[in-house]
Amino acid sequence: MPIIYDSHHDPLNRRRLSRARFAFYSLPALIACWLVFALQDELIFLLNDGKGLKYPKPAMAIITAVSYTIMHYLQQKLMLRCNDAEPNWLMEKVLFVLIWIAALSNGLPMLQSAPLAAAVVVQFTYGMLLPANSVPNLSGGVEPDNPSVHLGALIACLLALSLLWVVFRLAV
């Protein structure tokens, strides 16, 4: 006998994210990644009392902590996206290791926040590539999307594409 799950969405259940909601909820992480990426040199200068890149250790520690916070937020949303797509937990664990490596390597001044941008783009891309699942599962029913969620998802996709372009520009 098959298991029958609730067919309607429970408003208090936040264990699943559709593709559009994942992109919409990723928007703050993408904006924060852009801000860290764009303002890293100014942050180093300000946090080091005007000494610039000569003694970057305190500023890089703060930037590393901020980077980890951004990637951890996105990782939490990716876990909810994996709940929606069901069988994709192994890759999610690999991406969790990736955010640790990226957060630690983001503390090196010569990399200029490229690991942060690359990790955020990889997490976002993986969440968007997971298959859609409109069938209720163990994590509950599907929450319907609205037009504002779709608009936010479009903006998030454009920000992710621009981050990808910047990472490739730095790599070349």
Image (cartoon, grey):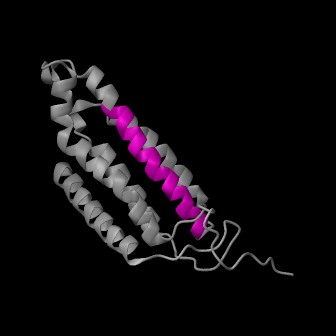
**Would residue 147 be found to the left or right of residue 42 on screen?**
right
**Residue 124 at what x, y percent from top left?**
40, 60
**Residue 35 at what x, y percent from top left?**
24, 45
Q: How many marks?
A: 0
Residue furthest out toward the front: 11
In the image, residue 50 sits, relative to residue 63, either above or below, namely above
In the image, residue 80 sits, relative to residue 75, either above or below, namely below
**Residue 89 at what x, y percent from top left?**
60, 58
**Would residue 28 be found to the left or right of residue 88 on screen?**
left
Q: Look at 48% across and 51% down and name the residue there.
A: 75
- What secondary structure do most residues of the magenta stretch adopt? helix
The magenta span reads 63-84
- Pick the quarter of the image with the N terminus: bottom right
Nearer to the camera, 121 or 23 = 23
Whether residue 107 is in magenta: the answer is no
Whether residue 77 is in magenta: the answer is yes
Q: Look at 39% across and 71% down and name the residue there.
A: 149
| Image quadrant assignment for residue 160 | bottom left
Q: Look at 38% across and 77% down and name the residue there.
A: 147
Q: Look at 31% across and 33% down and name the residue there.
A: 63
In the image, residue 154 sits, relative to residue 73, either above or below, namely below
**Residue 31 at what x, y percent from top left?**
29, 52
**Would residue 73 be found to the left or right of residue 64 on screen?**
right
| Image quadrant assignment for residue 112 | top left
